[in-house]
């Protein structure tokens, strides 16, 4: 259930890519409430990746505040930012989410390796991982298979389990369904919603596909929250 | 878990990783092999002569005396008179004494006159005796026993006649008195293999018609007459001496070195061998240097492999970063992987070495007379192996730093 407390707030954020073609991304005001499911719609090249990198703290804003779960991550040292990401954010990418040579179990447990508090929330990691797999409809014998041997749809479910383990407050999914066919897309999203509700986490999903909109609490268009300027040098 | 992931990552790239490990293994096997051959050669060298307490000759340098008396290299500057020889032989602390007379040759091989006691007293490789493989020891004045290399090089069999040349690389032959091969010694890996052994009397016999190094014109004493002659030599080249007790060696050495009638030199073979090895030892340093370079080459090869794998592994690194791994973790992973590769390479190299030794040991022994012992790796060798692993880890830091930069720039987003 959405509450009034916001899990994510961006204020007056400006970030400039410097390089041959420099461009600037500005996010004046954007926030996500705790427990909300938000769909962020945007075409490729609309600055989605940059925005996600800012939220995850792999890049830092040159100006403004990026507040995740009450912490201004722009002010943290790179080391603390990495740790912060491990503790508070579960990530699902479009595809190639997993270490193909590692087992499904190792892939699911990987974020715990870098997050102490999350690890402590999972006293029996193997059982928790197994439960998550079961909840996400993965076959039981998949746990010890190499992640690379699974189908794309199954891999996305493993990625979801990995994002959910240890109950991080924020889950970010970057086009998690675009590599899946229509039927699998629906099942995957249903499972993802169900699980994020069960684990009481906030879901911020980025996509270019407006058809998914009606399943979310709120839909935000990239163009409405962010401006970008390109200039060729 | 990280070790397991690193291992899995290596396994996923089995072919390139395997080739890298094989390269490291081969270089390690080569390095340790050179090390084994070196110590084996050193031991074989030190074992060229054993059981002999002193070598006595005319006064010169100890290395020189060793070279001509044992290795048949170079010439004696002077002889030892038969009188002196008998004086030494008569001393109470002398257990046995074997005279050696050098100076003639057969083809490229030296001829050595000695007494039958030589076959019993000359020991090599910690106490092994000479064994007459074919035929028997000398029975007749003109019998000869030849070393294994002499027989194999010149294709001699028991019963073949041979003619001894006067001096070395000489055109004047002792063709009036041909010898007969009575026995062939088994391979020893010592200079005995390249020696034609005759009796001390035979050396006298072939020089009956000679005076001060030249043949007396027109004089040919018939063999029958020579056989009747008193063939005691007036001088010999050197003598091998055994003492009655260990503690008498130094006293005897001192007595011989201070022998008033003639300037003599007595040396301890072990000490002289050590001195000689120090001269030969320069080559071993070069060998070690070359094989060390091979190890370095293999490690650089590994570094190149890691470098070229970085691009295809950007996704992997991005996943780690997305999970909250610090770039330092990625450096750590690469270093762990490299150390694993180096460790596997070192272990495989060790296995290859022992396999190689096991296969090649008998061949090396029969071909070169070099006995390479197969025993547990020495501390030094273990340090070499540990060193390879550490060097592998150090070398991998360079691509790891590049990976660090890449993953900082890429973050979790990789556009491939």
Image (cartoon, coloured by chain):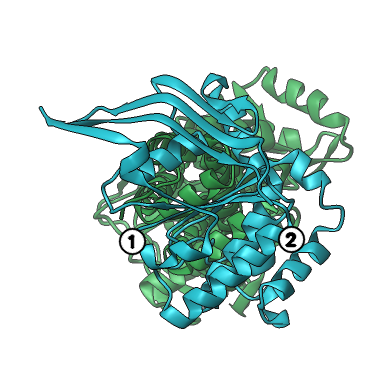
Above/below status of B367 relative to B85: below
Q: CA distance from mark 1 to mark 2?
A: 99 Å
Q: How many marks?
A: 2
B68 left or right, relative to B186: left
Which residue lies under the disc numbered 1? Answer: B107
Tell me residue A17's x, y (percent).
28, 30
- Colour of chain A in the image: cyan
Classify the position of the C terminus of chain A by image quarter.
Answer: top left
User: Residue at 83% across / 66% down in the picture?
Assistant: A127
Tell me residue A62's x, y (percent).
38, 20
How packed is label 1: few (under 14 Cα within 10 Å), some, or many (20 or more)?
Answer: some
- Of all chains, the one bearing label 1 is B
* Near-viewer residue (A190 or B298): A190
Tell me residue A44's x, y (percent).
28, 53
Q: Which mark is residue B250?
A: none
B291 left or right, relative to B311: right
Above/below status of A128 relative to B133: above
User: Residue at 88% across / 30% down in the picture?
Assistant: B247
* Near-viewer residue (B106 or B350): B350
Tell me residue B36's x, y (percent).
59, 52
User: Residue at 64% across / 20% down in the picture?
Assistant: B261
* Near-viewer residue (B376 or B121): B376
Q: Is residue B187 visible?
A: no
Mark 1, secondary structure of its residue: loop
Chain letter, colour green: B
B39 left or right, relative to B241: left
| Viewer-side label of 1, 2 | 2
Q: Which mark is residue A198?
A: 2
Mark 2, secondary structure of its residue: helix
């Amino acid at each position: 259930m959405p509450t009034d407390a916001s899990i994510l707030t961006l204020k007056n954020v400006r970030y400039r890519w410097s390089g041959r073609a420099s461009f600037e991304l500005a996010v004046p005001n954007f926030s996500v409430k705790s427990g909300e499911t938000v769909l962020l719609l945007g075409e490729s090249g609309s600055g989605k990746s940059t925005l996600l990198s800012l939220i995850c703290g792999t890049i830092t804003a040159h100006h403004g505040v990026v507040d995740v779960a009450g912490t201004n991550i722009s002010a943290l040292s790179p080391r603390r930012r990495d740790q912060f990401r491990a503790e508070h954010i579960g990530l699902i990418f479009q595809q190639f989410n997993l270490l193909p040579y590692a087992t499904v179990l190792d892939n699911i447990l990987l974020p715990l390796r870098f997050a102490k508090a999350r690890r402590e929330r999972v006293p029996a990691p193997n059982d928790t991982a197994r439960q998550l797999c079961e909840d996400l409809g993965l076959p039981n014998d998949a746990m010890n298979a190499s992640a690379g041997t699974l189908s794309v749809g199954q891999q996305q479910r493993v990625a979801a389990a990995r994002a959910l383990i240890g109950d991080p407050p924020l889950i970010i999914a970057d086009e998690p369904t675009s590599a899946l066919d229509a039927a699998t897309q629906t099942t995957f999203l249903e499972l993802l919603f169900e699980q994020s509700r069960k684990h009481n986490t906030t879901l911020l999903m980025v996509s270019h596909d407006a058809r998914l909109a009606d399943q979310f609490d709120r839909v935000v268009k990239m163009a409405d929250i962010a401006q970008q300027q390109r200039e060729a040098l | 878990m990280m070790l397991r992931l690193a291992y899995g990552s290596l396994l996923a790239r089995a072919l390139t990783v395997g080739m890298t490990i094989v390269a490291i293994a081969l270089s390690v096997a080569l390095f340790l092999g050179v090390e084994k051959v070196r110590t084996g050669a050193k031991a074989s060298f030190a074992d060229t002569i054993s059981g002999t307490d002193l070598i006595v000759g005319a006064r010169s340098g100890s290395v020189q005396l060793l070279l001509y008396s044992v290795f048949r290299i170079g010439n004696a500057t002077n002889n030892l008179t038969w009188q002196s020889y008998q004086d030494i032989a008569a001393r109470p602390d002398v257990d046995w004494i074997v005279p050696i007379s050098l100076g003639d040759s057969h083809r490229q091989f030296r001829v050595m006159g000695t007494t039958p006691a030589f076959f019993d007293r000359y020991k090599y490789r910690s106490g092994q005796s000479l064994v007459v493989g074919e035929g028997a020891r000398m029975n007749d004045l003109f019998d000869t026993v030849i070393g294994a290399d002499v027989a194999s090089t010149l294709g001699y069999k028991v019963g073949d006649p041979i003619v001894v040349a006067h001096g070395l690389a000489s055109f004047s032959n002792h063709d009036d008195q041909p010898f007969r091969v009575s026995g062939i010694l088994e391979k020893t890996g010592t200079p005995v293999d390249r020696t034609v052994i005759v009796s001390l009397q035979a050396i006298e016999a072939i020089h009956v018609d000679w005076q001060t190094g030249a043949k007396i014109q027109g004089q040919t004493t018939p063999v029958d007459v020579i056989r009747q002659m008193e063939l005691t030599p007036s001088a010999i080249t050197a003598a091998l001496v055994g003492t009655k007790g260990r503690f008498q060696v130094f006293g005897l050495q001192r007595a011989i070195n201070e022998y008033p009638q003639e300037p003599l030199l007595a040396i301890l073979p072990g000490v002289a061998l050590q001195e000689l090895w120090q001269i030969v030892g320069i080559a071993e340093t070069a060998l070690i240097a070359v094989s060390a370079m091979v190890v370095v080459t293999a490690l650089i090869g590994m570094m190149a492999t890691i470098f070229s794998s970085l691009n295809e592994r950007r996704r992997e690194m991005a996943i780690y970063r997305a999970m909250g791994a610090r770039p330092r973790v990625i450096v750590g992973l690469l270093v762990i992987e490299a150390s694993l590769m180096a460790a596997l390479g070192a272990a495989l190299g060790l296995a290859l070495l022992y396999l190689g030794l096991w296969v090649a040991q008998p061949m090396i022994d029969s071909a070169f007379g070099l006995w390479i012992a197969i025993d547990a790796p020495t501390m030094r060798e273990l340090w070499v192996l540990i060193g390879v692993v550490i060097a592998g880890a150090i070398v991998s830091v360079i691509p790891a730093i590049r990976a660090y930069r890449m993953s900082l720039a890429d973050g979790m987003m990789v556009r491939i």
